[in-house]
Amino acid sequence: MFRKKREVIDMCVFDDMRKKNNYFKDFHNSDDIEEIATEVRKMFKLEENPTQIANILDRVGIKIFILEMPENISGRIGIKKEFEDLLGSKKILQINSRDNRGHQRFTMAHELGHYIFDYNGRDDYADAYCLDEKNVKTSGEVRVNRFAAALLMPKDIFIEKYLEHRSLGINDIEILKKSLADEFEVSKTAVSKRISELGLE
């Protein structure tokens, strides 16, 4: 019964968005991506930080497994009917246990991005988040990374917290990044990129 309820939530949350935007294939503009992340936060009534990304995945029926994986792979999402009997859900997400918690949370949001932008309801879907330089620079990966950042570090809240920390006299950039990373439960690398993409440096 609970599984069916989660599937209904999934259909209600994302199918209309996919139909309206042709699976978001045309969304590369940063403002559009910020808007989509904001829309997802509103759908799940996410008003506080840090963003409860694991709860979102659970509510759309994606089961998370944390296991040791090669160093250059942060995570993999798979959707296959056969997974239901084997793993308890047809939608699974594997997260690399070697990564720190902040990076694991970013990977969850990254793969949720692929689920929203790229999954079109077919029975057999897979994607791996590889950290190879060539892979991370593709337009699809840039798009979901921007989405993950916007979901986990919402623009207005992030800017407010950044300025708040600055007003408290935190001027050492590394201390500032560490403080924001702790607040949003992401990696310092993610914070550094978010500061840059929002033009806060």
Image (spheres, rainbow, N blue to C red):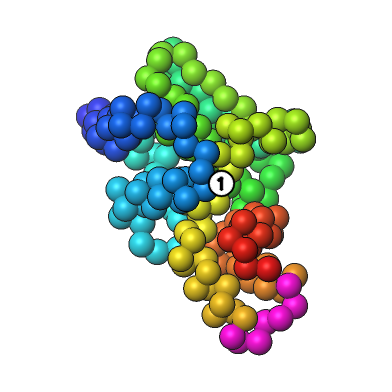
Q: Quadrant of the N terminus?
A: top left
Q: Residue at x 52, y 58 (%)?
A: 153
Q: Residue at x 35, y 49 (%)?
A: 39
Nearer to us in this view, 173 or 78: 173
- Classify 10 Å Cα crowding around label 1: few (below 14), some (14-19), many (20 and above): many
- Write down the region rendered in magenta: 167-173
Q: Amino acid at mark 1?
A: Arg
Magenta region, main secondary structure: loop
Please, is residue 46 above or below residue 29 in the view?
A: below
**Mark 1, secondary structure of its residue:** helix
Please, is residue 56 above or below residue 126 in the view?
A: below
Is residue 59 at all visible to an observer of this figure?
A: yes
Q: Residue at x 29, y 38 (%)?
A: 13
Q: List x then y, in percent, for residue 177.
A: 68, 67
Please, is residue 188 above or below residue 169 in the view?
A: above
Nearer to us in this view, 166 or 187: 166
Is 74 on the left or on the right of 160, as rendered? right
Q: List x then y, in percent, for residue 109.
A: 51, 43
Nearer to us in this view, 7 or 190: 190
Q: Residue at x 68, y 68 (%)?
A: 201
Is 119 on the left or on the right of 107, as rendered? left
Please, is residue 49 above or below residue 89 in the view?
A: below
Query: Residue at label 1?
Result: 146
> Which image quadrant is residue 49 in?
bottom left
Q: List x then y, in percent, for residue 145.
A: 58, 43
Q: List x then y, in percent, for residue 65.
A: 54, 34
